[in-house]
Image (cartoon, grey):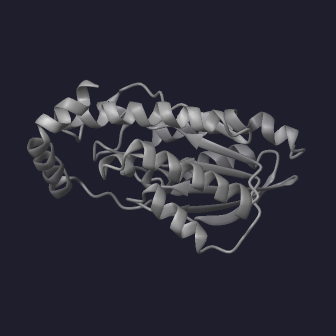
Amino acid sequence: MLDVAVRILLFPVLVAQAAEVRRTALRLDDPSGLREGFSGHGPELHLLIIGDSSAVGVGTSHQEEALLGHMRKRLSQTNTVYWSVNAKTGATTADVIAALQECEPRKFHVVSVSLGVNDITTRVPVSVWLRRCSELLELLERKFEADVICVSGIPPIQYFPLLPQPLRWVLGAQAKRFDRALRVLVANHPGCRFVEMDFQPDVSHMSPDGFHPGPKIYSEWGRKVYRAIRSDIKRLGKT
């Protein structure tokens, strides 16, 4: 694995670049809007969105433009959707597990998961991350009785304009490795669906910070997640 060798050889350079990015990066606010509520008409459908800043919707001005807004709009056409967002900027998979362990048990029909980027940037090994992902899926199935868990893949970090080279290339290679491993894990969980984050590397569609999605990407992402769970919603008799 060439990127591992590069990471070892250029470790001081990569550390310096990462520190500079953290120091100078544009800090975007979380979008406004409710993170819990209900809307629509029809059979009840309980939706939970968990994860990091992308699950929060950073890069948009309002939750209506974020993943929540796009999922809610589609699902509310056929269902009364009770929706909740439990996500935080900077969250790792371990952080989300800890947060969910503090929550009261509650039934959710659909759970959307978006995690991994912060695990990569904080140098969590793939093997450790996979164990935590497996623990998270089991927690969602056991404590929150999730019928369907929609797991989004790792975005193409190698195209993020915020990151300088060679840091961008090294993190991008690790992102691909995380994504491949996540696909296998999800494939072995019958109640899980994988959403490929194969967006075109058009930097004009990203947010001004060069790291988070912009509204157009959130719109496409919401469409992908909905398509991944649409047949499951019908199977559950929710439409």
Q: Position of residue 159 (x, y in %)?
A: 30, 31
Residue 132 vs residue 117: left or right? right
Extreme residue in the right direction? 237
- Left or right: 134 with respect to 238? left
**Residue visible at 36% across and 26% down?**
201
* In front of the other: 191 or 218: 191
Q: Where does residue 20 sit, x and y in percent of width and height? A: 13, 51
Circle count: 0
Quarter location, residue 46: bottom right
Please state the horizontal and vertical placement of residue 88, each as a whole percent of the image.
45, 62
Question: From the image, which quarter does the C terminus lie in?
Answer: top right
Task: Give me the residue at 63% from left, 51% from top.
Answer: 137
- Residue 160 can be seen in this image: no
Q: Is residue 178 above or below residue 49?
A: above
Residue 8 visible in the current orientation: yes
Q: Percent position (x, y) of residue 185?
A: 58, 38
Closer to us: 109 or 100: 100
| Front residue of 77 and 110 | 110
Q: Residue at 46% of width from left, 63% of height from top?
A: 95
What residue lies at 59% left-to-right and 55% top-to-bottom?
136
Taking 128 as reference, is 208 left or right? left
